[in-house]
């Protein structure tokens, strides 16, 4: 309260959020934030999903400036790979050699929050990804098992060959 010059010792609470809904939840036990600032420590900054919505968060106090990071699972037994996203022209992981690594970068300022998707520069959109399904969702990025397919048959309840299991009329 008595300081009148910023000596660089100020820290800013930064909220990191990563959507894990497009990942198979049985493929990992816990999610963690990784950074060279932490020595790529392999789990020393665990994240939590307190409300069970699949989005894991952690708040870290950091100084102003650039902060390089990525997300990993289970003490680095898994980690996000954003190289393909960067080769395709995305910009979420600018610290990259376009071959073996691509790490995220954020500029720390007061009240900054991330909203990332594990392993992707794009948002996680669950839905039916099969274009042959009745409920195909062209913007879905991950199939959620909800695809519905035609079961052809007679749908006219007055017809003698009515098929109560039919979802599409065969004419």
Image (cartoon, rainbow, N blue to C red):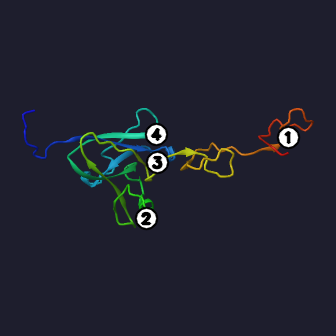
Q: CA distance from mark 3 to mark 4?
A: 13 Å
Picture disc at residue 54: 4
Q: Identify the secondary structure beneath mark 2.
A: helix
Q: Which mark is residue 123?
A: 3
Which numbered disc, 3 or 1, marks the residue that appears first in the sequence?
3
- Closer to the chain start, of discs 3 and 4, is 4
Measure the alpha-carbon separation of dots 4 and 1.
Answer: 42 Å
**Residue that numbered label 2 is attached to:** 87
> How many residues crowd mark 2 within 10 Å: few (<14), some (14–19), many (20+)?
some
Q: Quick one: 40 or 104, which is closer to the camera? A: 104
Q: Mark 1 highlights which residue?
A: 154
Count the marks.
Answer: 4
* Label 2 with label 4: CB-CB less than 8 Å: no
Task: Give the residue furthest to the right.
Answer: 160
**How far from the left and from the top, in percent, is residue 42?**
33, 51
| Residue lying at 64% horizontally and 51% vertically, measured from the top left | 130
Indicate the secondary structure of the residue bearing disc 1.
loop
Report the residue at 36% width, 41% height from top: 47
Is label 4 in a helix, a strand or a loop? Answer: loop
């Amino acid at each position: 309260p008595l300081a009148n010059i910023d000596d660089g010792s100020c820290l800013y609470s930064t909220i990191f959020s990563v959507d894990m809904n497009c990942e198979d939840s049985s493929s990992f036990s816990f999610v963690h934030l990784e950074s060279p600032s932490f020595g790529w420590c392999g789990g020393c900054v665990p994240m939590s999903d307190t409300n069970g919505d699949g989005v894991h968060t952690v708040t870290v106090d950091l100084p102003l400036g650039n902060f390089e990071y990525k997300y990993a699972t289970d003490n680095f037994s898994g980690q996000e790979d954003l190289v393909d996203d960067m080769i395709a022209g995305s910009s979420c992981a600018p610290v990259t050699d376009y071959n073996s690594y691509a790490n995220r970068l954020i500029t720390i300022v007061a009240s900054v929050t991330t909203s990332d998707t594990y392993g992707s520069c794009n948002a996680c959109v669950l839905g039916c990804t099969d274009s042959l399904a009745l409920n195909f969702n062209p913007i879905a990025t991950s199939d959620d098992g909800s695809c519905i397919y035609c079961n052809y048959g007679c749908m006219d309840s007055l017809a003698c060959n009515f098929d109560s299991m039919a979802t599409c009329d065969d004419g």
